[in-house]
Amino acid sequence: MDTQLKKGLLDVCVLSVLRGGESYGYKIITEVAPYIEISESTLYPILKRLEAAGMVTTQSREYNGRLRKYYRITDRGLARIDEFIEDTREFDKIYSFIVNGGKQ
């Protein structure tokens, strides 16, 4: 899969997990991994980028004697999911055109 395409998909996959409620790194990985390959070294830069873009917020809390960072989606992150869904509808039309040999 194209690297840039995968990067965009991973962003939205992470946001989709957070749409279900706040979460932390390892849990996000376990929820995304069955659908698209993701590792810690991939996830944390995504989370930093999403935070810088205002799509997620973070809060650190103690868990079993150490700090764990929890991520929560913002309204901007929810809007990004909606944009992605709309983009996907357009992509589906183009994909269908290609699969059908340039015929509607």
Image (cartoon, rainbow, N blue to C red):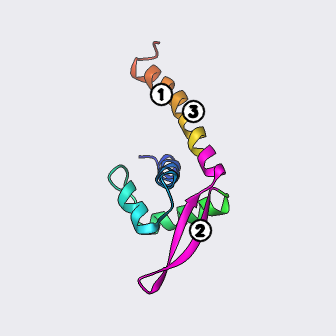
Q: Could you tell me which secondary element the residue under label 3 belongs to? A: helix
Three-letter code, disc 1? Asp
Separation of residues labelled 1 and 3 (CA atoms):
10 Å
Give the image quarter of residue 51.
bottom right
**Mark 2 or mark 1, earlier in chain:** 2
Q: Residue at x 66, y 50 (%)?
A: 76
Q: Is residue 84 left or right of residue 29?
A: right
- Compare residues 22 and 90 and report the one nearer the observer: 22
Which residue lies at the image location 58% right of the left edge and 71% below the top edge? 59
Kind of element beneath mark 2: strand
Q: Residue furthest top?
A: 104
Q: Amino acid at mark 2?
A: Thr
Q: CA distance from mark 2 to mark 1?
A: 34 Å
**Residue that label 3 marks:** 86
Tell me where the magenta segment starts and ends, as one range: 55-79
Q: Residue at x 40, y 64 (%)?
A: 27
Please identify, in this view, whether the residue under mark 1 or under mark 3 is nearer the observer.
Answer: 3
Tell which circle, 1 or 3, labels the residue nearer the N-terminal end.
3
Q: Disc 1 marks which residue?
A: 92
Could you tell me if the residues under marks 3 and 2 are in contact, i.e. CB atoms within 8 Å? no
Helix, strand, or loop for circle 1?
A: helix
User: Looking at the picture, does residue 86 appear above or below residue 10?
Assistant: above
